[in-house]
Image (tube, helix red, strand yellow):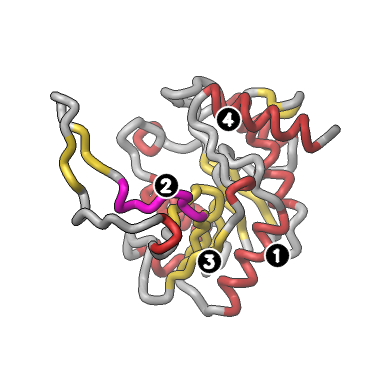
Amino acid sequence: MIALILARKGSKGLPGKNIKLLLGKPLIAYAIESALKSKYIKEVYVSTDCIEIAEVAKQYGAKVPFLRPEELAADNAIAIDTYNFMLDKWAEAMLDVESFIVLQPTSPLRTTQNIDEAIELFAIKKASSVISYTEEHHPISWHKLINEDLSFTNLFDDELLNRQDKRKTYFPNGAIYIFKASLIRQKKYYSEASFAYIMPRENSIDIDYIHDFEYVEYLLMKKNK
């Protein structure tokens, strides 16, 4: 299977985060290295609009045969358009890509074991997609809209139940996406043959802001002691 990592240079929450040093190693290197250790991944491609990111990615073993077009790296660009662009490029290179795995560089606590288990689930289920999820600690029925005057608007009907009496809910953690190319060609992420790979919360931190980065740094330092 081919792995794809999207890493554009523009980042509003934490500028330059994809190559920001995390314990002395660029953030994107964690995704590349964990992918290359997988039993099932043959090649790792990085899609970026930044020469500096491309050079760093190559140093850690990824392939970056071209830069991403500017329109696919803009703030309003959507990932699925880049996936289809990459499928076109792989086809031009005579690569028969029936399925691929996407690994966001902002999930450095995702492990090679997580990657391999997700790929195995994809194969066992004969899935069109497998997407990583983690358990939500609080019921989504507790969520409210807060108005400008700080009053509440319900999202759901009120239920005065204890948390333990509610069914567990899960949210996508952004760490792992596995797709059949045919599903992406339809510009879809989900079908009736889509399944969740459940990841533990401690592996599910997605870095958007500096406090996320510093928390992950703390966890890795604690783990490496």
State which mark lies toward you, 1 or 2.
Answer: 1
Please, is residue 169 above or below residue 20 in the view? below
Quickly name the residue at label 4: 18
Residues at circles 4 and 1 in contact by the CB criterion of under 8 Å: no
Q: What's the amino acid at mark 4?
A: Asn
Q: Which residue is drawn at 48% across and 50% down?
A: 137
Q: How far apart are marks 3 and 4 (CA)?
A: 25 Å
The question of residue 43 being in magenta is answered with no
Q: Which of marks 3 and 4 is nearer the N terminus?
A: 4
Residue 33 spot, x, y in % from top left: 73, 45
Say left or right for 116 vs 206: right
Q: Residue 32: give x, y in percent of width and height.
A: 68, 44
- What residue is shown at x 65% (from left), y 58% (from top)? 115
> Badge 1 is on which residue?
40
The crowd level at tag 1 (other Cα within 10 Å; few <14, some 14-19, many 20+) is some
Q: Does residue 203 sit above or below 76 in this rendering? A: below
Q: Is mark 2 on a helix, strand or loop?
A: helix
**Label number found at residue 82:** 2
